[in-house]
């Protein structure tokens, strides 16, 4: 089963703080919806751009995408 990484981009001087907080809400969503995977995180791209992400199975992507509206997605390679 393919895994997809859903990504939210945050820009500006507070991007890291916002992405870290967004990850907290992604973890809550995973628990509430009882999703099969529990892979989340945030990555600092540079001092003005940080991403938050969660990984979902391909068959779960559409309902999660529609509910959480990520900015983009990509295949997830472990």
Image (cartoon, rainbow, N blue to C red):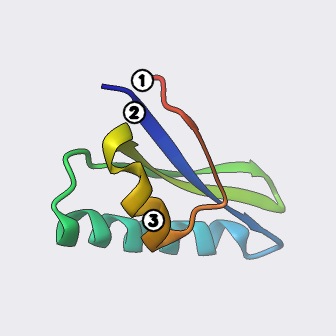
10 Å neighbourhood of mark 1: few (<14), some, or many (≥20)? few
Give the residue at x 64% y 56%.
51
SS at badge 1? loop
The residue identified by callout 2 is 3
Say left or right for 27 vs 36.
Answer: right
Image coordinates of residue 7 in percent, x first then y, are 59, 53
Q: Which mark is residue 23?
A: 3
The residue identified by callout 1 is 78
Task: Note whether 23 is above or below 60 in the view shown.
Answer: below
Image coordinates of residue 13 in percent, x first then y, are 81, 73
Task: Note whether 38 is above or below 57 in the view shown.
Answer: below
For the residues bearing labels 1 and 2, Cβ distance under 8 angstroms: yes
SS at badge 2? strand
Which quadrant of the view contains residue 47? Answer: bottom right
Q: Earlier in the sequence, mark 1 or mark 2?
A: 2
State the CA–CA distance, disc 3 to disc 2.
Answer: 18 Å
């Amino acid at each position: 089963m393919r895994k997809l990484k859903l990504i939210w981009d945050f820009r500006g001087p507070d991007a890291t703080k916002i992405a870290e907080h967004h990850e907290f809400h992604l973890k809550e969503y995973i628990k509430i919806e009882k999703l099969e995977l529990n892979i989340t995180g945030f990555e600092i791209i540079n001092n003005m751009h940080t991403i938050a992400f969660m990984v979902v199975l391909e068959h779960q992507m559409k309902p999660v995408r529609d509910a959480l509206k990520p900015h983009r997605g990509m295949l997830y390679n472990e």
